[in-house]
Image (tube, grey):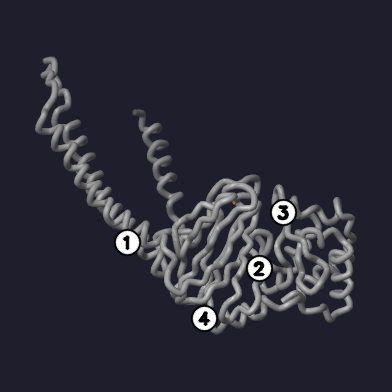
Amino acid sequence: MKPRARLVAALACLGLLAVGCAKQAPLSTLHPEGPIARTEYGLWNVVFILAVVVFVLVEGAIVFAIFRFRRRKGDDSAPKQTHGNTRLEITWTIVPAILLATLTFPTVTTIFSLARAPKGAMQIQVQAQQWWWKYTYPKQKGITKQFTNANELHIPVGRPIRLALNSADVIHSYWVPALAGKQDVVPSRTNHLNIEAPHPGTYLGTCVEFCGLSHANMRLRVIAQTPSDFAKWAAGQAQNLHMPTSALGQKGMKTFLAQQCVGCHTIRGTAAAGNVGPDLTHVASRETFAGGIFDFNTRNLRKWLTDAPAEKPGSKMPAGVATMGLSKGDIQALIAFLEGLH
Ligand code: CUA
């Protein structure tokens, strides 16, 4: 190999190595939190260590053979031909069989124990669609009324949560690496996934099954709260909307109700009862919107209401200006209305 080619090859290898590095890597399975992710991580560790031992032994033997038995200068004799070695063949059949049998036991028991519904779990319905997540919270202690929320899953810490996952269209996959492994979300079938957060905080996640144009724009976050904060949040979410108090907000509400917005969105306490897009009753209580890709603020809302499909390719939300014919003033009023929906 020429020195230059060697340099290029070395740089390419370095580049490949570097893509595995990130100071801030929120989507990493290597920092499990909570009992479920930790159990999975424990199993992964056992498999990984065994795999490393096998890798080093096998590759070591190959490298040893390459150097020890390489053709040397002045040696033109043909290599000795051999056929079959019963003892070796039995060994390399039995050793992997023992290894696999050893791995089977912890793998199967872990799979079954994680598949069970944990005691005292809160069950939350998750519906995936292009390209956002809809959560439906059950009626139960602390939650007096069923309500829905989008993209941001609020949960109480220290309590197991059982997600019942469905898809409204194509196959998606639910993944919050700090809390649990991936779970496919398939149309006409309910899959389950257990999660439990050990302490308050925000755990980031995303869809990990290619599901169309905006697959990369289908993010999610799990917001874990103390049980009392969670109960407060849930009580607020179960209420109908807070009526706008400013004149601009009231104008925005009128615009909203007169537009096709009502065909797709629900705002509890108004005539808007659409089921295509997220429930907006308390949209201003969310940190993000549009599949979790934008921070909830005035600037992003304006961009979104002006031309949603330009912000999120394939979005079912029509372009506000070009398609729905909204004026600048309409958009200003709609923003005032939406920002009041706490
Ligand atoms: Cu949903 Cu990818």
Q: Which residue is mark 1?
A: 42
The amino acid type found where label 4 is placed reads: Thr
Q: Callout 2: 10 Å neighbours few (<14), some, many (20+)?
A: many
Query: Residue 74 in the image: x percent, y percent?
Result: 12, 18
Q: Mark 3 to mark 4: distance in Å?
A: 35 Å
Q: Given this view, does label 3 or label 1 mark the residue nearer the observer?
A: 1
Q: Say above or below: 41 vs 1.
A: below
Q: Mark 4 to mark 2: distance in Å?
A: 20 Å
Q: Which residue is mark 4?
A: 226
The amino acid type found where label 1 is placed reads: Gly
Q: Is residue 63 visible?
A: yes
Helix, strand or loop status at disc 2:
strand
Q: Which residue is at 63% across, 79% downward?
A: 144
| N-term mark: 2 or 3 | 2
Q: Given this view, does label 3 or label 4 mark the residue nearer the observer?
A: 4
Helix, strand or loop status at disc 1:
helix
Q: Which mark is residue 311?
A: 3
Q: Is 339 in front, or is 18?
A: 339
Query: Residue 176 in the image: x percent, y percent?
Result: 50, 61
Q: Mark 2 to mark 1: distance in Å?
A: 34 Å
Q: Is residue 23 left or right of residue 60?
A: right
| N-term mark: 4 or 2 | 2
Q: Given this view, does label 4 or label 2 mark the residue nearer the observer?
A: 2
